[in-house]
Structures are given as structure tokens and as C-alpha cells.
Image (cartoon, rainbow, N blue to C red):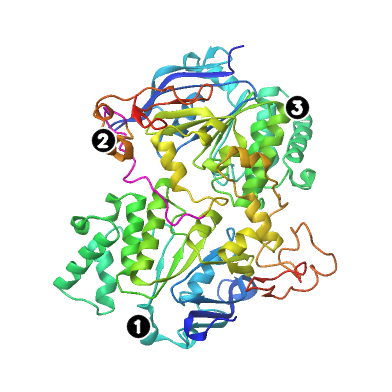
Amino acid sequence: MTVQEQDILVRVEGLKVHFPITQGIIFQRQIGAVQAVDGLDFAIRRGETLGLVGESGCGKSTTGRAILQLYRPTAGNVYFEGENLCQVKGEKLRAMRRRMQMIFQDPYASLNPRMTIGSIIGEPLEVHGLASGAEVKERVAELLEVVGLNSYFINRYPHEFSGGQRQRVGIARAVAVNPDFIVCDEPVSALDVSIQAQIINLLEDLQARYNLTYLFIAHDLSVVRHISDRVAVMYLGKIVELTDRAELYEKPLHPYTQALLSAVPIPDPEIEERRRRIILTGDVPDPSHPPKGCHFSTRCPVMIPGTCDAQEPEFKDAGGNHWVACFRVS
Amino acid sequence: MAPLLQVKGLKTQFFTQDGIVHAVDGISYDVEEGETLGIVGESGCGKSVGVLSVMRLIPTPPGKIVAGEVLFQGRDMLKMSEEEVRQIRGNQMAMIFQDPMTSLNPVLTIGRQISEALELHLNMDKNQARTRTIELLEMVNIPGAAGRVDDYPHQFSGGMRQRVMIAMALSCNPKLLIADEPTTALDVTIQAQFVDIVKRLRDELSMSVIWITHDLGIVAGLAQRVAVMYAGHIVEMASVKDLYREPSHPYTLGLLGSIPRLDAERRSRLTPIEGLPPDLVGENRGCPFAPRCPYQKEHAIERCLQENPQLAPVGTGLKHQAACWFDVRRGMAR
């Protein structure tokens, strides 16, 4: 990619994450692998939001976790400011984790019910030695205000809060340690529409305020379009298309992206009447036995027999930094 | 001709340790024959409880339908005996639930679960029911239906299971199909498949449909009329075109303002609805939306806090109603 090296915060090269399928009770023989993420190359620029969209099971969350080394990749490298995270371990990795945080999807499952809000947000501060004693409390109160919660909530427990408020707590915990990079894994999917907008605005404010870089994982294409600078579309373990937001939504090149965009309902009956939908048949194939050739070939409306189901298309620049993996695009 | 379904002043309450939850607090609507009504609202607004009450599926206790009428083909469902309701439910009135994973019985085959209703309501014998089941599965685009009728639910994907739910719901040619967030658990491409099938079958069988969702986008392409619910009340009701062209309740406006749209110019910021939905425990005076309403704040309308507005005609559209003391179109109190 034609971006200056110093602008790049995270670079992913040939990332693969395979989960073994084993059989046997004592001697667990591996009989196969779920190829959740199967060879990704992309970079995230400093200060940008890279949207990662795809349907359930396409490997988008696994990608986010593998970047943070929450899963150790099967193959490939992840560079964070030039440092290969896949080779860092132990204390050094822990120290680096201060700079990369994560916001989780389910605000009900990602907060410890037995800890107060204050200790949830304060814990990373103490772990990373950023504050101690009374300082912690002071900083937590400040963070609560930053994410739009009242600072007297500090001694309350998660169950006393609504979904949107809990998600604010999760965000406060992530920004507490002054990270550079945050993986937002479907942060608004579990929330109601009116609350979603509050959280999206908050994430945008925090990005501007702390100069954060986001990897924003979501399945909602409208939300991703709103928040992202560039967007990557994933299908069954691979990125099929990656380009600037405007370009992707105006001129999608990959047939999967086209179908995906046409499937999103638009809240306007007059537009809906005129729209032509591309309805894909069938379901996403099993990632432990992905189809030969292009992974999308089994559902693709413009599949070329003999080519698409035999060879894998190369992920390449179709011009103007519009990356796509499809034989139909030359 | 009278509408197929008339709901009048329906109130459903739950009696809990914390007090009485006014889940549905006096809603009225009609569904004409062949019409699709969309009911839109966020979690906890009473949209599901509303239709479960219509089907008489509210667990009692703790729930209870305390007032109202539900006229289905002119007969009041709420006055029928359990036996009479059972004749209608699953037969002339069918329902699809949100979660296809938990609505199917995991230890019975797909075929058995569909043919059960056929044998029960239409008095078919085993062979007739089986033939019809395969037909139904073909109708909802299950590939190789004849070979898959003896499969178990776990052998089907999420999208296929939801299509099985439709086949099951349609097995007795219902007059009214109630779909409670049927696509929420599905991916967009699977959702598009599903909506496509429902539209096709609705037109072929000239069914009425009540489609419950939180997604204003789906309703736009599917329903003829839409009811927007908030805190147990219908706050706006209109034809689908009027609703999106002239949204007239501050809550509807808020909902439309808070969703990023795929087609619109990208705005730099979304305009969320501030605050949280109200607690439905206890009596509520005034408009339930007043604490979050930007118009109430701006114009300091005292009446909003004192009296709950009823649905009243608004705008230029036919049968366009909103429950609000403020006329957002003209910018003045009503």
C-alpha cells in the first residue's frame, strides 16, 4: 500500500487463525481446523477508523482478537508501530497492552458483576501503574464524566445500569490507560437504536479528544459507513474488498459487497419500492471445509465456472487504492 | 367490511414484587384483510406483549390482560374459552418468534413439528400431512425438501430454521401471520432472503401480517401501515409513506434521526434521543416521552407533564395520527 510507513500504526501481514478440531479423550488428535481467519493483509493508519464488516462467523471478531494477541495467530505477523507483536511475550507484551484496548459487544457479559464501577475502571490503572491510592478514585471520577456518566456512580454495581450505561463503563475502562489503539468489537449491536446513536457519538468524541485509532468491527453496514474512514469487507475468513468509505459504498466492486449493500433496508418506502435487491441463495459455507477457489464462489451470482471454483483470486489494487479479490474485476 | 382484526383499548399488566408493570397501556389498532401492519419500537416498549395478548399467550400470573377487546373476524378473543382460542391459534392466526434456535423442539424432526399442526387442525392423516409438509418446505425454499424433512433442527442453519418456522406458521393457511422480530437474529443477506419469501407468500396467500421490529428500515419496504410504540402506548400511526414523509411524533423523529442511513449524505453527527426509556412500573401521569422530548424542553409545555395525549389526526395524510400535545409540523402547541 502506498501509505507512508510512519503513518501506519498497525500492520497485519498474512494473518491466519485456525482453531483445531480434535477427537479423542486423552490423546486429542487433531482431525481438522476451523479456518476462522485465513490470510489477511491490511494496515491501519494512525488516527483513522477502519471498519471491518461481515456476517456472523466470517472471522471479524477473531481478527480483532488476534491483532491484540488474545488469540495467538497460527501464521502471519502483526506489527504495532513496527514491533512484531507475535514475537513479544510475557511482561513486555503486558506492558504493550496498555496501548491497545478493546471494547466488547455485550455490555452485560463484559463487566464483572461483583466489582463496583469504580474498581472495574480503576483496575487497569493500577495494573499498569498509572495511578495509585486516591489518585485512582480521582481519575475514575474524571473518566466517568468523560463518558457521560455521573461520578457518584463510582460505588455502584453493573446491574444497576442499563445497557447503554454499561457500554459507557466499558468504554471508560478502555480509555482509562490512554491507549493509542482500540478494537471496538460490535460495540453498539446489543443496544437499542436511540442508545446506539449516543454511543457512536461518544466514540467519535473520544477519538477526536485522545487521537485514538479504531478498528471498528460490526455487521451493520449503515453504522460502519457512518463511523469509518476506510472499510474492509470480510467473507469466510478473508477480506474480499478494502477501500475508502465513500468509494466502497458508491462503487462496490466485489459481488459479495454488492449483495450485502443491496440487502440493507433503507428507512424510506419510496426508495425501497424502486430498489433492486440481489438476493443471495444458500448460506455461508462451513469454515472448517471452505470451498475451493474463491470462498464466495458457492453463492456468487456472477461466478465463472472453471476459474472461480478452482483458483483463489488475488487480493489486489483495482486502482485508486481500491483493493478487491475477484476474478471479475481486472 | 369489518377489519380482520380489531384491537380496542388493550391493556396488559404484570404484577411483580416491584409493583404493577404497565407493559401495554391502552392500545388500539385495526388490521384489514391482506394488509401488513408494522409495529416499531425499542426493547421493552410493549410491542411483543401487545401481540402475545392478542394471541392469548400472556403467562398468567404474573401477567394479566386487564382491559380491552380483541376482535378477530368479529369475535372477541378475550372472551373465548381456552378451547376456542386453541382452535384459532396456530390455525387461522399463526406466529413466528424471534429466535429460531429456541422455538423449535430439538428432539423432534422438522417434518414431525410441521405435520403436527396439520394433523391437529386440518385432520390430515400421516401420509397427507407428510406430503403437505414437503410442499411447505419447498415453498420456503429449503433445497432438497423431500430429503430433509426427517432432519433435526440442529442440522439446519439459522436462516433455514427461521424458514421452517414460516412453513410451520403457514401450514394451516392462516388469515393472520404475526411475526415477532423474526429477522433480528439473522444476518442481512439471510434477512433479505427471508423478507423476500414472506412478501411472496403474503401476496400469494393474501394473508394479513403484523410485523414487529425495531428496524425502521425493514418496515419501509414491507408494511402498508406502521404503528410506533413507546412505553406501552402507540404514539404514532400512519400509512408507511406518510410516516416517513411527515413523521409527526417527537419520538418517531428521534428514531429516524438516530439511525445512520446507507443512502443519505453522511452527517457528521447523529442526533440521539437523550436519556433512557422510562420505567413502566406504577401509574404514569403525563406523556411517557416527555422526559426525553426536545420539544417539551424547548417550549416548556406544562400539559405534557400533566396529561397523556391521545392519538389525534395530524398532517395531510389520511388516517395519520400522533399522540402529542405539540404540533411538530407547525411548531406550536395543539
Q: Please name whichever residue, B279 or B151, is drawn nearer the observer in this view of the structure.
A: B279
Q: Position of residue A55 (x, y in %)?
A: 59, 58
Q: Position of residue A188 (x, y in %)?
A: 44, 55
Q: CA distance from mark 1 to mark 2?
A: 47 Å
Q: CA distance from mark 3 to mark 2?
A: 50 Å
Secondary structure under the numbered disc 2 in the rendered image: loop
Side of B205 relative to A19 (left or right):
right
Is A94 contained in the magenta span?
no
Location of mark 1 (residue): A95
Dot 3 crowding, Cα within 10 Å, few <14, some 14–19, many 20+ = few
Side of A29 relative to B293 (left or right):
right
Q: Position of residue B315 (x, y in %)?
A: 47, 26
Name the subunit of mark 3: B
* Precedes in sequence: disc 3 or disc 2: 2
Magenta highlight range: B266-287
The answer to whether residue B167 shows anywhere in this view is no
Q: Amino acid at mark 2?
A: Asp
Location of mark 2 (residue): B18
